[in-house]
């Protein structure tokens, strides 16, 4: 029996997709072998990766002048790879709105000049910076943001305006594919797969073509966007199984009606949860400003932290898992990615209401 | 029905292991979720990675003063990562014995001084260099070798003696776990998973502790062996599914009796194939010197290349796949990794004999 898995990532994957993966694990389409066992240079896998890219382009409306790369090393490796590829001896701006953009800012520093263009750390990352708080360099090589902070539960619905000619670079790891995004506003989008895309070990980079070819001389081939674009993400063996699984997820999202439909479902799920917090009369609390509350990661604390362990124990009884909050924030966190069902959110809300009624 | 898959990698995986993966894909040990969906920080996955490491240590007899790292980016990323971590402003020696060590030599060059200590390219990589042909630098930061060349089918059974104090660094991607190896002879061993270990997207590094901590300042955290060792390979989310599958492969090899037993099976398989080539009276030919013939990758050409397409077509009829040779070598290549059965080799040998009798 499947559990309701609220883990922040690796995270729940759609049951129907996993059933398909299971059914073809030893024999994909009668080939007598699974996808994992196939040469990445063969016709079959070439079709799989091409279809995954085409479906992602369709889902996100990726313009033709953007390359889609299937890479390894997670978003954390991108924290270094982005300055290696884009800095080109210049300076870059970073806006810090939570733990992940702070890491990106720190990891970029060995590669050149990196400026802090804004930060909400003084407010414990409970809000987003206002436009008038940002100090943006009009000469920056790029402006880096994290559009959804997995740990602090802060999501950007209005993306900061970069100075003219400064490409916006966005870490979308924990909310990519959760709603339509205007890709043309970005120079580069990246996302680790292990939330809304597929299994850990795959990272997707969507990069505007004019940003290619600026990599520093010590950028290894597999980390050089231009080289990987030229080789169709296959300078070496790519993470074939992850790409295959991502492709199935993309098809599943298309079948659901695309990202506009997915967004409606995500709004419904997040609203139920935030409403339950608001209606609890302070028993539960989410510290994030209303306009910046993430639809994917909902951290909340209990007014009485001595009840945390009881809450988690009761959740486990009800087969609700992965709810313990990140240690830097405490309390609970419900990650409600695309693959979390409304049924799972309803079960959590029911527990929250019942628990508060008994212990409040 | 499963095929006999002679692909060079990604390659055949053991059917029984894949059956287990399939059976627990949606629900691992009653947890209500698959391994892919679990937090890498949780107790369950921590157990999986710890057990995988312990089993690998036992299988290979890895001494206590070596770290085992589960990384991403493939062996190709290691071509850059090794000099970034070990060069420390010095020079390194490379012995080039085939396409892969040649790539490793080339990819290392942007990171510092790299010397060609020996090469058999003039002989089309059909042999290994003799000790008296090597020009080894006694001050080198390391000596790099590739102990099995996947494309050229050249395997080192006697490993070159590095000068005193110079650590030997070996790419063992395509024959790791095929037989016992004396790990203590090496400073660092690395191997992409997609041959004898598991799915593509995982690379294993086994590194002696005294070599840690010399990384250049521009080494990203996820690429820094010391940092990754300190974080148990989990500075960021590791490729959890690949590590889990590798762990199952390790258990399977232990159940077979460990690497000494695996070696006997591999000797039996390779002998049958090389004997069939030798007995063909020149119809089939392997160009590699007897003492350096790989037990994992057996390239062979037909005396009449006009028959190549017929051979491949007949092989396909018999459900023998992945036999087309690498374009740089031509002809055929049978990769007979651990998971290739003796039955598969027998089927190939039968075809070779029958085909030669009819067309010879």
Image (tube, coloured by chain):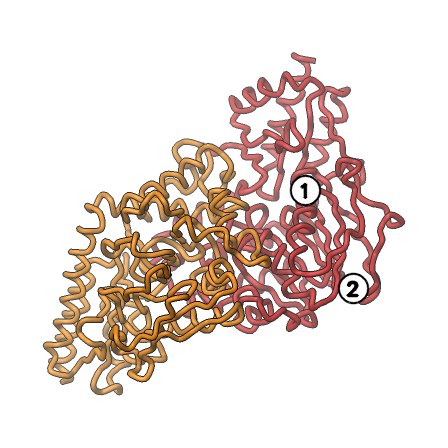
Chain colours: A orange, B red
The spot of residue A254 in percent (x, y) is 24, 44
The spot of residue B71 in percent (x, y) is 54, 60
**Quick check: marks 2 and 1 in contact, CB under 8 Å?**
no
Residue A248 position by quadrant: top left
Residue at 80% across, 67% down: B165
**Residue under circle 1?**
B99
Q: Label 2 neighbourhood size at 10 Å, few (<14), some (14-19), many (20+)? A: many
Q: Quadrant of the N terminus of chain B?
A: top left
Are discs 2 and 1 located on one and the same chain?
Answer: yes
The answer to which of marks 2 and 1 sits earlier in the sequence is: 1
Q: Mark 1 lies on which chain?
A: B
Q: Can residue A51 be seen in this view?
A: yes
The spot of residue B187 in percent (x, y) is 71, 63
Q: Calculate the distance from the C-alpha at mark 2 to the C-alpha at mark 1.
A: 24 Å
Residue at 48% across, 65% down: A90
Q: Mark 2 lies on which chain?
A: B
Closest to the observer, B99 or B159: B99
**Residue under circle 2?**
B166
Horizontal arrangement in the rendering, residue B5 relative to residue A45 (left or right): right
Closest to the observer, B68 or B4: B68
Horizontal arrangement in the rendering, residue A279 relative to residue A112 (left or right): left
The spot of residue B308 in percent (x, y) is 62, 21
Q: Label 1 neighbourhood size at 10 Å, few (<14), some (14-19), many (20+)? A: some
As helix, strand or loop, the secondary structure at mark 2 comes to loop
Residue A116 position by quadrant: bottom left
- Is the residue B258 above or below the residue B304 in the image? below
Residue at 12% across, 71% down: A275
Disc assigned to residue A265: none
Residue A342 position by quadrant: bottom left
As helix, strand or loop, the secondary structure at mark 1 comes to helix
């Amino acid at each position: 029996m499947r559990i309701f898995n609220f883990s922040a990532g690796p995270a729940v994957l759609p049951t129907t997709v996993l059933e398909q993966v299971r059914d073809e694990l030893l024999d994909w389409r009668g080939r007598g072998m699974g996808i994992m066992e196939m040469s990445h240079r063969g016709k079959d896998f070439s079709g799989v990766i091409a279809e995954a890219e085409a479906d992602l382009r369709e889902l996100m409306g990726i313009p033709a002048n953007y390359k889609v790369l299937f890479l390894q090393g997670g978003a954390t490796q991108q924290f270094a790879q982005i300055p290696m590829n884009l800095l080109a001896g210049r300076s870059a701006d970073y806006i810090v709105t939570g733990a992940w953009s702070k890491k990106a800012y720190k990891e970029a520093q060995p590669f050149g000049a990196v400026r802090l263009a804004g930060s909400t750390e003084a407010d414990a990352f409970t809000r987003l910076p206002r436009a008038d708080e940002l100090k943006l360099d009009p000469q920056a090589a790029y402006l880096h943001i994290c559009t959804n902070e997995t740990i602090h539960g802060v999501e950007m619905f209005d993306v900061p305006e970069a100075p003219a000619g400064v490409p916006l670079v966005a870490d979308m790891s924990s909310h990519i594919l959760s709603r339509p995004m205007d890709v043309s506003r970005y120079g580069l989008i990246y996302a680790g797969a292990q939330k809304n895309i597929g299994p850990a070990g795959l990272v997707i980079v969507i990069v505007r073509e004019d940003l290619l070819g600026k990599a520093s001389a010590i950028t290894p081939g597999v980390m050089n966007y231009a080289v990987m674009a030229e080789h169709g993400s296959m300078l070496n063996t790519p993470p074939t199984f992850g790409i295959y699984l991502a492709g199935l997820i993309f098809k599943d999202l298309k079948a659901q009606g695309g990202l506009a439909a997915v967004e409606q479902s995500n709004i419904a799920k997040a609203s139920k949860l935030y409403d339950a917090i608001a209606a609890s009369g302070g028993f539960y609390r989410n510290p994030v400003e209303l306009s910046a509350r993430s639809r994917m990661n909902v951290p909340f604390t209990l007014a009485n932290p001595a009840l945390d362990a009881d809450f988690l124990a009761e959740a486990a009884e009800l087969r609700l898992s992965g709810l313990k909050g990140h240690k830097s924030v405490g309390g609970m966190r419900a990650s409600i990615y695309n693959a979390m069902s409304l049924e799972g959110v309803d079960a959590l809300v029911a527990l929250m209401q019942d628990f508060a009624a008994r212990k409040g």
